[in-house]
Image (cartoon, rainbow, N blue to C red):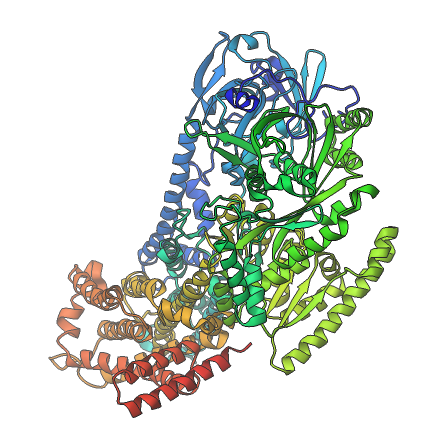
Amino acid sequence: MKGMEMRGGRKRSIRLSNVYSFSRFRSSSGGNHSQIGQKGYSHVVYCNEPDHPDAKRLNYKGNYVSTTKYTALNFIPKALFEQFRRVANLYFLVVACVSFSPLAPYTAISIVVPLVVVIGATMGKEAVEDWRRKKQDIEANNRMVKVYGGDQTFHETKWKKLRVGDLVKVEKDEYFPADLVLLSSCYDDGICYVETTNLDGETNLKVKQPLEATYSMHDENSFQQFKALIKCEDPNENLYSFIGTLYHGDTPYPLSPQQLLLRDSKLRNTDFVYGVVVYTGHDTKVMQNAVDPPSKRSRIERKMDKIVYILFGILVVICGVGSIFFGVETSKDIRGGMLVRWYLRPDATTVFFDPRRPYLAAFCHFLTALMLYGYLIPISLYVSIEIVKVLQSIFINQDPNMYYEETDRPARARTSNLNEELGQVYTILSDKTGTLTSNSMEFVKCTIAGTAYGHGVTEVERAMARRRNGGSPEIEDQLSNLTGDKGDGVDLTKSIKGFNFLDERIMNGNWVKEPHSDVIRLFFFILATCHTVIPEVDEESGDIHYEAESPDEAAFVVAAREIGFEFYERTQSSISLNELDPETGAKIGRQYQLLNVLEFSSSRKRMSVIVRNEEGQLLLLCKGADSVMFERLSEHGRIFEDETKDHIKKYAEEGLRTLVVAYRELGEEEYNTWQEEFVNAKISVTADRDSLVDAVADKIESDFILLGATAIEDKLQEGVPECINNLALAGIRIWVLTGDKLETAINIGYACNLLRQGMDITVITLDAPDIASLEKKGDKEAIEKVSSESVMKQIEAGKSQVVSAKANSVKSALIIDGKSLTYALHGDLEKMFLELANDCASVICCRSSPKQKALVTRLVKAGTGKTTLAIGDGANDVGMLQEADIGVGISGVEGMQAVMASDFAIAQFRFLERLLLVHGHWCYRRISMMICYFFYKNMTFGFTLFWFEAHASFSGQPAYNDWYMSFYNVFFTSLPVIALGVFDQDVSARLCLKYPQLHQEGTHNILFSWHRILGWMLNGVSSSIIIFYFVTTSTFPQSFREDGRVAAYEALGVAMYTSVVWTVNCQMAVSINYFTWIQHVFIWGSIVLWYLFLLLYGSLPPLLSTTAYKVLVEVSAPSPLYWFSTLLVVISTLLPYFSYKALQVSFFPMYHDMINRMQLEASAASHSSVSATARVEDRIRQLKDRLWHHSEP
């Protein structure tokens, strides 16, 4: 059999073709090479002559690559610069420098050590992360590759030693060490297969082919005399473009991306290739793309900066107040020649206390106070938050409930900066295909010659049935009939990926009996040939696996195979099929000469191939979107147009993706004329080469004969409807931005609960007869004017409709098509459109381009002023993900570009529910509480210093020992707040999902509002007042020690400091909702650590321990007053918080308060009598009603 012969060998003598995507172009004097040599096109490569004198003068970069942020030489200065860019750190650096002067109220080392610890910890983290990158660089730079040497043989050398112009040999499954121009391969026609997963995440194989001048070089001897010159574009980041010319002898050959092998892509299914290095190291395209993603900071972090500035303001104010009082009092020390405070010896003092220069003394005091009260600024805040966020990210990464076993992919927090932002998401902007759907296409239905084929039932159809009937009995009956019918000859137990077609009229060769069997044959023949799929044959089983650029292309080829048109081999110039013979019913091998492939693009919306069959006929085969295909039909090719359009509309309503299939025969003269023009356009070396090629392709893609249309289903991912429903209950606005038709988008919306029964739907579209007639005339100005006016009128009508719906307590949804969106995003309409959209619970933008997705995201982010999250899975979603506050990438089948551009990565859309409602809520609450508590504890500590200063006439004398102050933020209060940020939970994960309304605490920013922040600060000030005055009044008037002596300065400092440590840690204990053993260890351990420090530090010689010398053992511990005052102070400081909390929970409960109360009362009901249980259940119902009422937007 001829078909079996075709399968036999892969290497055959294939000569030149002029295929669009699989072509080597001959030189042509008609090509436009005008850009070569100009700015941006000055890169010159001496092939196989890296030591050429001119090549050396060019001084190109080597192939050594470094992705590290630091080097051994610049680490310390650069890392220090990064740390001291933060205002707080810079402040402490200045304080540390000034602490070496007489102005300092404490020893220099006591401020330097904590600063070094905090800065050193952060720099250490940076060093560890950078060292990991360094190890990856070392591994990459020391990989081996074969290079052609002066001895005319290939020898191994390290990647980092490659130079521009080197000739290299790369073998199967090896990575390309630099950007290479392909010269030849193991195949006779020189093609090779490349996997670009590391570049764009796409796993499908891509075909590359060499030029005519080099494809025949298959062994080392071929390169002995090989010399060539390449002039091409300068290094740039564009992965999908390459313009250049190779000069071999006196002949120029144009270069295109088809000859470029990019660094870090892998050679697959090819034994070896030869290539010449054109770009090395950081000039390679992958390294040119290695830029940091847009810097994103959470709203809480930005607000935290404002709070730090406020604290700086408070610091300056209290320093100013204290200095004024100090200056006034100092000026009175000598009055009329008399010494007022004679014990201070104002007549023989330094400039810092000189009553004759009170202004200078006040200024010096101001500087001293800036250092003394600097503890208002939390030195460990930033590093603590970094630690907490990293630990939070680890919990997100290790959550088993967000692990997708089928693809072995867990959730991944690619940045820890935005954890708390997840709990504040107000708007979600989602792609559809591959995000809401599985992007696993199945061929379900088709229409051929005006007849609809396929009995499959889609998810959208089921949803439509449920919407109409409150259930789906009709659908269930239909499915039962399909599966129960044994006479159709269809094996329903056989599962074929990409194929879910059920119709006895077509299957098992029955299509030959249909009235239009010739049309059916052509239809599936086109599906088997019009594609760029690469077949891979399993040598053991003989099964064919298809590598396709998109899942729908694979589905078409699989469908053709199942019907009887098996595609099994492609070469650079041919496609081979095993076709079902309508007469004999046997499989016959046929080979078709592949002349041109006019590839699909978002602007063309179609794909065509030109083939020559064994009879010598030239056929142009095409499949594309109905919006561009029907206008290209010939007069005699529209026989089935009306029926096909009706079927396409029905398929769209069922949520299916459709493509129109058509063909035409070409004459030899027509083809040759077009081919000459096409080649000239293709070899032109100009920036607009692609548009020239498209224009020429457009000329031949006309006068088609319509055959029919395909309908494939992209099924919803598991759990999508439930996820969207819960996100909507959480008060999150959901936008879907899709390229689907209006009808498809609406029905998909219903299927996934984005649109719900009873919703008031506003549709904005420009599919109107008057606009269509203007488009036919081509009057652009008139089209723009009429379209803009139409969109404005529809938006105004939509506003009225939404207002009316709100009055009737009905939620609204907005649907807008791509044309309308173009006008809605410009000028005055932009604001009107956003106002309308914000009043709607759901928005669907159909027929949206990638640029429109990014523009809509920018509009929503800027217009609402609230957190936006974008989620997508493809390269066309990257702009949207980077524009949003949070980008979430779906690690699906469209590659990893979206994931690489995202902040968080998940495998399935349904995991978004847990990411936002559980981790988002917890992280938001933890970070908010953590920051508020940080400022509270520092206000408590800092203001005790201020009150003591006021008591001591603002003398600059600190209340505490130097090391007490230094270790306050670092040891005695830091660990409990980190535990709070990592482990605290107000409600469990189960309750977070059960009551999604809890998410609105974040969207309304309840836990980090200004009144809450200021409340914590005031709590700190009031605590400092209670601590200072309770300790001083209980300590000074009576004897403190056993021998009757009153408390001295050092005992007062210890008593106050002990009260502060107990107070702030007990405040932490009563604020925590979820205790673990770690919290207990950190909270009570911090208090114990204070006593151990005091004991050990006090045991040092007085020269080192100064005021702490044996103060605990000999003074404080033996005194009952010390312990009693501590107990009294702690109770007194916590009493205001308890009172406030009781009032707030009773009369102004937040969401989590209501949920916790419901849980407590439900637990009580389970242990109560029947009558008591009824009362409790009634109370729970009231609380639930209250919760739902609070959650209404």
Of 604 and 180, which appears nearest the observer? Answer: 604
Can you see residue 319?
no
1156 to the left or right of 544: left
Of 499 and 963, which appears nearest the observer? Answer: 499
Report x, y in % for residue 73: 43, 36
What is the quadrant of the C terminus in the image? Answer: bottom right
Residue extending furthest toward the left: 1043
386 to the left or right of 603: left
Report x, y in % for residue 875: 58, 46
Can you see residue 818?
yes
Classify 1164 as above or below 175: below
> Residue at image x 44%, y 14%?
155
Classify 810 as above or below 903: below
Q: How many marks?
A: 0
> Residue at image x 25%, y 72%?
1058
972 to the left or right of 585: left
Residue extending furthest toward the bottom: 1171
Of 338 and 289, which appears nearest the observer? Answer: 289
Q: Quadrant of residue 1156?
A: bottom left
What is the quadrant of the N terminus in the image? Answer: top right
Q: Quadrant of residue 830?
A: bottom right
437 to the left or right of 34: left
Report x, y in % for residue 1128: 24, 83
Report x, y in % for residue 173: 45, 27
> Residue at image x 44%, y 43%?
77
